[in-house]
Image (cartoon, rainbow, N blue to C red):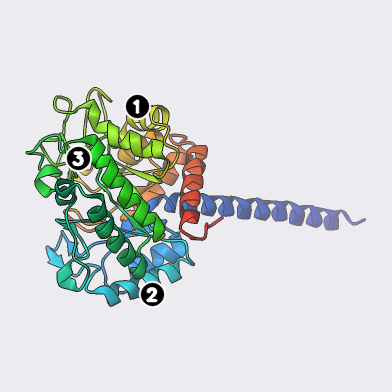
């Protein structure tokens, strides 16, 4: 056989192998980035969505795991960020879910009282604060408002509520919990009983609940939205009780972290970035097997003290499965989700985060989504 012919065949064979290998590598990279994107819940601007919007590309091309809706846009100090009225929100959620092919967590902070994105003035149902419900301390009253809220969320197409707050009223002058009436009580048992009702009513309407802010934010004297918040001298171990009881009860799917710093838990990092807090205590001591989600990574306690790369690396290795990137802090960055995906991907390539850690997080997210009828990517 002609030597030139054999050489040509050999060259074609080698190039074919290289092309197949390159395509496999490209597919592997794409899958890994899509798993990473599933770890993100992203804030965006707009009461509608079309093909030119950033959120359209993030859902269709990057496959982000979820979005979070707000009525108020902090950078511009204007309302109507995502929410105008019930019909508009329902249409928006339907369009977002359609883009994701039924894979999207559509989330909101709808605690009631002062943390109320779905305001009565927009045409939504009236709400009541957790503190007022705790003062009444009547389980039928709490169930009434919990059921009303859950039915409303379900009718709109929202499937994840970042509530209830299971923080205690540990300090009356706590600016972010007690002063905003976000806690049921100073009594852990009262907090447990009423939080359990909210979770139960959400489940009936196919709504996921996220209990927050682990390991307890009620003893802080400063606000993690603004800057570093140290609770070392004010924190009490009883703040863990509602978390422990709800997890033991078996109905807790998601725990949201707090950005507080407690030297007794971790002498270097705030709780969101602390392996001891999230893996040793929440996973180990309290036996929580569900999804751990960070509080908003745009809050000052994190964003003012750590670069994005360090905060994501430490938080993932500490045990965080999902991140809230609200894009609703001091400034709006339309590229933040892309930056986060590329940053986490680079950390995997640099062996600073293991691919198994990403797989474990994705598998927990996939299991979570199937609970509310969402379709996993893989």
Q: Can residue 338 be seen by looking at this rendering?
A: no
Q: Quadrant of the N terminus?
A: bottom right
Q: Nearer the viewer, residue 273 or 348?
A: 273
Residue 334: which numbered mark, if any?
none
Residue shown at 50%/55% (left/top)?
Answer: 370
**Which residue in the structure is indicated by mark 3?**
301
Observer-side mark, 2 or 1, equals 1
Q: Can I make out residue 71 in this image?
A: yes
Q: Say which label, 3 or 1, has the lower sequence index.
A: 1
Residue 267: image x %, image y %? 25, 23
Label 3 or label 1, whichever lies nearer to me, is 1
Instruction: Tell me whether the residue at label 3 lies in contact with that at label 1, contact meaning CB atoms closer than 8 angstroms.
Output: no
Q: Is residue 130 left or right of residue 161?
A: left
**Residue labelled with disc 1:** 276
User: Residue 81 location in percent, x, y?
Assistant: 21, 67
SS at badge 1: helix
Residue highlighted by disc 2: 51
**Front of the two marks 2 and 3:** 3
Q: Residue at x 38, y 45 (%)?
A: 254
Q: Quadrant of residue 54?
A: bottom left
């Amino acid at each position: 056989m002609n030597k030139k012919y054999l050489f040509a065949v050999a060259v074609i064979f080698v190039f074919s192998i290289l092309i197949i290998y390159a395509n496999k590598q490209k597919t592997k990279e794409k899958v890994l980035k899509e798993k990473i994107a599933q770890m993100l819940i992203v804030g965006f601007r707009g009461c509608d969505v079309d093909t030119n919007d950033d959120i359209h590309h993030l859902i269709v091309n990057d496959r982000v795991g979820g979005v979070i809706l707000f009525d108020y846009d902090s950078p511009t100090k204007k309302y109507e960020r995502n929410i105008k009225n019930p019909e508009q929100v329902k249409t928006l959620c339907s369009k977002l879910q359609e883009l994701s092919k039924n894979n999207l967590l559509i989330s909101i902070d709808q605690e009631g009282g002062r943390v109320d994105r779905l305001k009565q003035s927009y045409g939504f149902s009236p709400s009541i604060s957790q503190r007022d419900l705790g003062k009444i301390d009547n389980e039928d009253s709490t169930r009434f408002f919990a059921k009303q809220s859950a039915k409303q969320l379900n009718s709109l197409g929202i499937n994840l509520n970042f509530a209830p707050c299971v923080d205690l009223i540990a300090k009356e002058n706590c600016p972010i919990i007690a002063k905003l009436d976000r806690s049921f009580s100073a009594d852990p048992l009262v907090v447990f009983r009423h939080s359990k009702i909210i979770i139960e009513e959400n489940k009936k309407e196919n709504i996921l609940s996220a209990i927050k802010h682990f390991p307890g934010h009620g003893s802080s004297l400063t606000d993690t939205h603004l800057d570093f918040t140290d609770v070392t001298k004010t924190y009490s171990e009883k703040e863990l009780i509602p978390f422990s009881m709800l997890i033991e009860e078996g109905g807790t799917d998601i725990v949201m972290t707090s950005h507080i710093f407690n030297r007794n838990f971790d002498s270097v990092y705030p709780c969101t970035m602390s392996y001891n807090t999230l893996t040793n205590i929440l996973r180990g001591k309290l036996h929580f097997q569900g999804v751990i989600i960070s509080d908003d990574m745009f809050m000052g306690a994190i964003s003012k003290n750590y670069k994005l790369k360090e905060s994501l690396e430490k938080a993932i290795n500490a045990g965080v499965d999902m991140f809230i990137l609200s894009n609703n802090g001091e400034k709006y960055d339309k590229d933040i989700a892309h930056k986060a995906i590329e940053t986490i991907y680079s950390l995997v390539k640099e062996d600073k985060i293991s691919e198994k850690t990403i797989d474990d997080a994705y598998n927990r997210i996939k299991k979570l989504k199937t609970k509310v009828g969402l379709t996993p990517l893989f």
